Amino acid sequence: MAGFRENEKQHFPLQSIQDVVDLFRDQLTGSDEPNLPLLSIVLGAIENVLTVNRSLPGEIDHSKTLEPIFPVIELETVEALYEKFVTHVKRSIDLTKFCGEVATRELVKLVSDVIWSSLMRSFYKDKAHLQSLYSFLTGNKLDCFGVAFGVVAAFQVLGYKDVHLALSEDHAWVTFGQDLLETAEVTWHGKGNEDKRGQPITMGVSEKSWLYLNDQPVLCTRQMEVASIVSGINPSISATVDSLEMGSLQQELLWLLYDMDHLSRYPMALGNLGDLEEISPTPERPQPIDLFNEAIQSALEHYNNQHVYPYTYLGGYLYRKGHHKKALQAWADAADTVRNYNYNREDEEIYKEFLEIANDLIPHMMKIVASDNAARIHHTSLLYDPDCYANFLRFYDGICEWEEGSPTPVLHITWAKQLVFSLSKFDLSVREHIEVKGEGLEDDSSSEEEEMEEEVNGRRGEEGEDKVMDDTEPSSSHRPGRRGRRPKINIEPEG
Ligand SMILES: CC1(C)CN=C(N2CCN(c3ncnc4sc(C(F)(F)C(F)(F)F)cc34)CC2)S1
């Protein structure tokens, strides 16, 4: 059984971050493809020592001795796991029935079944450190990303060059076939959703759905698949403690991939790197703000600006730094992106993101600026700034349009309460400086008003005079937004 190539073996044993970076650089340089199973096993083995089996009883408390505890990763360990993966894949797939150069849907489903059927019957799917082939080979556990990556790694072992990882902001699947035009589900998503493994991602499903990014997913090359496992490194030892060694390994590997231009079409990896640079800045490297803006530029240039996370990475960073006005602008830009989508039950992750921004971060920010008396007296705070008011309204307008036409409601009473709380903090003067322009509609707008009249009366009829929407669940009588065209509102400060 062909084990590792000579140029792979020479790096072992791995005893430092630099050794791992050298192995990855070697793997990413030259004409050969990077060995996906090898690299995933290496990262998983290191992560296991530095985060999972960290606090063994009786172990020296290295935080006291400040002595680094980078593990020694022996070639034998990694090679044995690699052979196990290769043997398992090759034994389970009889390729004589698949003679084509490229994969077929039947083969993709078969390989997905091989990974799937090897998983432990039941385990906590959301646990940390289940993303690597090390976890798969030593514990038969994988998270949903790990299954998709495992399928792609298995196809590399089988000699296929056309099967690649496709990534949205909360789901992963594969592309395959002659021009990478075929797609297939290979893993599950979320809780309580039947897996759709083997099925293509069709326009019917992916159109206006955030989970599939309106058909603008990140389509990985082999090098970007390496970037996805580096980005997927999880340095957390516990809810409050991170492994510094694991974090700096991730940071160094992301800079290696950045320098080799393998992150330019991967906004989330650029965002991850920005977060790591905020925690511990690397001298002579771009600032976090630059990386977040590169992620936004990447989404604008390559993904028709359909990605939301680049704006929430930036907004979160600006908020943490106290740049409240710019944070509001980034969040309004995020809402401008989500307005293209219809919210459905599998989009919970982005719902939670906007829920936290609207009902936690913005109200907290309003409290801080409202208590800043100096800024109040000099009218310099955002509460007097029409730009901020315009961005605030744009943020909420984006969320309202997101809800319109959606099968699942977004807003409920908490949203309304927090909106009123935040809105009331703005000074009355800001309203004199903004212009809410409705663009004319092609169809006869008077019917639009009549329809609006009906709708409002209709609702009142249904829910009683001005009844507050019920507190617990989004109101059941809530009907998806009007299907008719809506006035395009440009909210711009005057002048
Ligand atoms: C602004 C934020 C709330 C901060 N972290 C965010 N992350 C952390 C990193 N992250 C990611 N970072 C790199 N690559 C990927 S691929 C992926 C996924 F497609 F959803 C998968 F594979 F199903 F898990 C997720 C994800 C997901 C989004 S968004």
Image: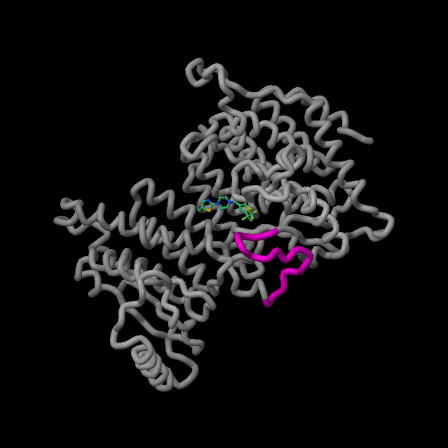
Residue 18 drawn in magenta: no
Q: Picture quarter containing residue 49? A: top right
Decide if residue 139 is on the left or right side of residue 387: right
The reply to whether residue 284 is in sight is no
The reply to whether residue 153 is in sight is yes
- Residue drawn at x 58%, y 21% is 71
Q: Is residue 402 above or below residue 302?
A: below
Q: Nearer the viewer, residue 260 or 65?
A: 65
Counting from the top left corner in percent of width and height, residue 155 is at 74, 45
- Residue drawn at x 37%, y 78% is 440
Counting from the top left corner in percent of width and height, residue 468 is at 27, 68
Counting from the top left corner in percent of width and height, residue 173 is at 63, 52
Judged by its main secondary structure, the magenta piece is loop
Counting from the top left corner in percent of width and height, residue 396 is at 34, 61
Specify start and end residues of the magenta stretch as a single range: 188-204
Q: Nearer the viewer, residue 98 or 325?
A: 98
